[in-house]
Amino acid sequence: MVFHTIAVGLLVAAVPLWIVRFVFLFNLEKPERQIFRNLVKRRFENTIGFALRIFGYLFAVSAAIVILVFGVRYIKFGSLQITPYRELIHSRLYSGVRPIDNLLDAFHYNQIMPVAVISTCLLLSIAFTLVMVALRDIFLMRKLNRKIQGLKKRQAVTG
């Protein structure tokens, strides 16, 4: 439940960050946008690669925990009973809107434990990637804008 809350919080935070990113991007002139795109392409990791790396880390950690939980369950009960996620986790995150809650039940809480863990890792990696890419771009555009303003001031003084 904690990871779902973190993922939903990150998704909610991503919306205004992406709006600010697009506002900053549209305030740049065409050559400045090209400079920004070149900087992102050359200096930073590909966004999809970053998301896959985050997903891989989360998946590896969660796989180790799932193996540990099922190993302890096998030692204790002598069987590997794979149950739906809803039987293991009693506290759930709901929106209060019936269609969305029904989709959450169908696609997450009614799944078997490993599938639910993978979907949580996927949601977390997508949410974290959206927030981090927007923040990276905002900070890069602000830095680029300050450098360009400094260049324009120097050109005005010398020109």
Image: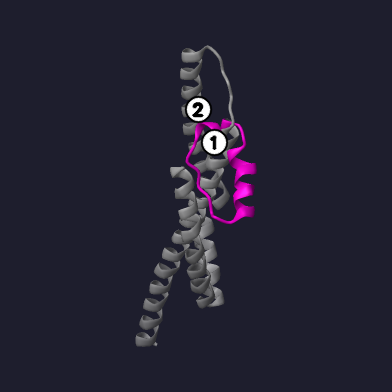
* Residue at x 42%, y 75% (from the top left corner): 148
Report the amino acid beneath label 1.
Answer: Val
Alpha carbon distance from label 1 to label 2: 8 Å
Report the amino acid beneath label 2.
Answer: Val
Residue under circle 1? 117
Answer yes or no: do the residues labelled 1 and 2 have beta carbons within 8 Å? yes
Q: Position of residue 15 (x, y in %)?
A: 51, 63
Q: Relative to 133, is 117 above or below?
A: above
| Residues in magenta, as a range | 87-113
* Residue at x 47%, y 54% (from the top left corner): 10
Q: Is residue 68 left or right of residue 52?
A: left
**Label 1 neighbour load within 10 Å: few <14, some 14-19, many 20+:** some
Secondary structure under tag 2 reads helix
* Residue at x 56%, y 18% (from the top left corner): 80
- Say which quadrant the C terminus sits in: bottom left
Q: Relative to 31, is 127 above or below?
A: above
Q: Position of residue 84 (x, y in %)?
A: 59, 31
Q: Look at the image and tell me whether residue 146 can be seen.
A: yes
Secondary structure under tag 1 reads helix
